[in-house]
Image (cartoon, helix red, strand yellow):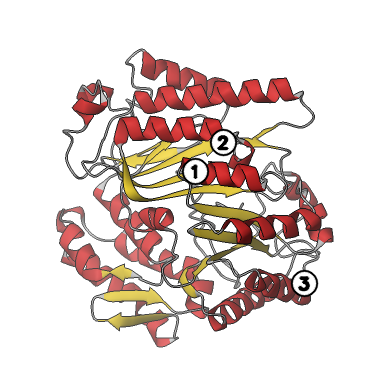
Amino acid sequence: MRTGLRPVSFLPGSVTTAKLPPVCSLAVHNPLKQGCESPQKASSVSPAEPRSAYLHLPFCKRKCLYCDFAVLALGSAPQETIQSRFSSYTQLLLEEIGHTCGRHPAGLETVFFGGGTPSLLPPQLLEQLLAGLDNQFGIAPDAEISMEADPGTFTAESLSAYMRSGVNRFSVGIQAFQQSHLERCGRSHDLHDVQAALGLMQQAQPASWSLDLISGLPHLSMEDWRESLEAAIAAQPPHISTYDLQIEDKTPFARLYRPGDAPLPADSEAADMYRLASSLLCEAGYEHYEVSSFALPGHRCRHNQVYWTSAPFHAFGMSAASYQQGRRVTRPRAMQGYQSWVQALAEERDPAASLEADSLQDQLLDMIMLSMRTSDGLNLQQAEQRFGRAARTAVERAVARHVEHGYVSFPEPDIIRLTDPEGFLIENDVVSDIFAAVGQIPEHLQAS
């Protein structure tokens, strides 16, 4: 949940069901047909190549009751077995990295280790992965290197080791500051672990770190939510993410709860929780720069901004998805399928050969959906340059009524964005209206 790019739909009547892939879990590009045989040969590729990489580390102590991500619960497996799994999976990632091209001359500027619980991986293995990335793509000196870390899975020593290997940003999955809510979610940590984790972060003082919370949990009251927000602010993280709970199919929560029905908050209550988060965090000096993200000045997540701007990125591991040369490619969710994927790469076969690049309209829809999640908004001039005057006209027409109602604003003549918090609350409605308008543009009026 903490890495999900979740749709926000608190108010009744939201229409769109479009959902983005997990925030830091978007899969692989196989450039073998381009003749990439070495990092040196890859370095001749154009500056349009990706400058970001996501690595999926699927291991967890146990799977949370709301989670639909591709994870491997370790449970009570013997330590020897666990270490063997860590090593084997690390080697698979290194193989995939070694068979992937697209080296930008300036190297990677962001790397994100998501999961799963990356902080379960021994620091020496994470260091090997960073070395593999550096060898294949290069890593810029000022790169943001992030990893997710759950309370109870790291120590002062492991934090220090991660930081020595190059990690300079952590995303800590707190989720709630009440023991009862942690237990209902099936989290593997308790409140003691939460306080210990916060103390370790404050002591280690990485360049940046984020604290994640989930709203809309079963039995979550407004008082509980305020308490969690105030506790998060008191911990003084440079970044806070607040995700609205989504009931995903085939999860234990899907069998236990129905959206909008007690003990889940009603739509109006969920909306009030969102308003409270925006109010308290902005008052505390955080910038609400994306639907679910708040940052102190200079601490926006650079990696996630790659997604919001539709920039290309590499990705590696089970279920991960990449975006390169106009193609989004997702790997298998299961370990066996992923092993076969990597084997195909080793045999110089493209497991995604049948996938075509996104159409021009798909690229426009992606640009709209992603940019409208942010406070920077949609740049109409850029949209017009890439997709034609008809695209701009369609967008302006679609948002006209939302501007009248105060949900959309034009901070500059060429920029439209959702207002905070009311516009963000009906993001799905606004984007759905834009999609409908764009869908009516005749193909001959679309320009690249």
Residue on which disc 3 sits:
224
Furthest residue in direction right, as rendered? 180
Answer with the quarter of the image where residue 8 lies: bottom right
**Spatial distance from mark 1 to mark 2, Cα to Cα?**
9 Å
Marks 2/3: CA–CA distance: 35 Å
Amino acid on which disc 1 is placed: Arg
Q: Is residue 69 left or right of residue 184?
A: left
Query: Marks 2 and 1: in contact by CB < 8 Å?
Result: yes
Determine the secondary structure under disc 3: helix
The type of residue carrying mark 2 is Pro
Q: Is residue 152 visible?
A: yes
Identified by mark 3, the residue type is Asp
Tell me the element at label 2: helix
Say which residue appears at 61% left-offset and 54% top-offset. 172
Q: Is residue 119 above or below residue 297?
A: above
To which residue does mark 2 refer?
A: 123
- In the displayed structure image, the side of residue 16 where residue 360 appears, left or right: left
**To which residue does mark 1 refer?**
164
Residue 17, numbered circle: none
Residue at image point 29% right, 51% down: 363
Q: Position of residue 163 (x, y in %)?
A: 51, 46
The first of marks 3 and 1 along the sequence is: 1
Question: Tag 2: Cα neighbours inside 10 Å, few (<14), some, or many (≥20)?
Answer: many
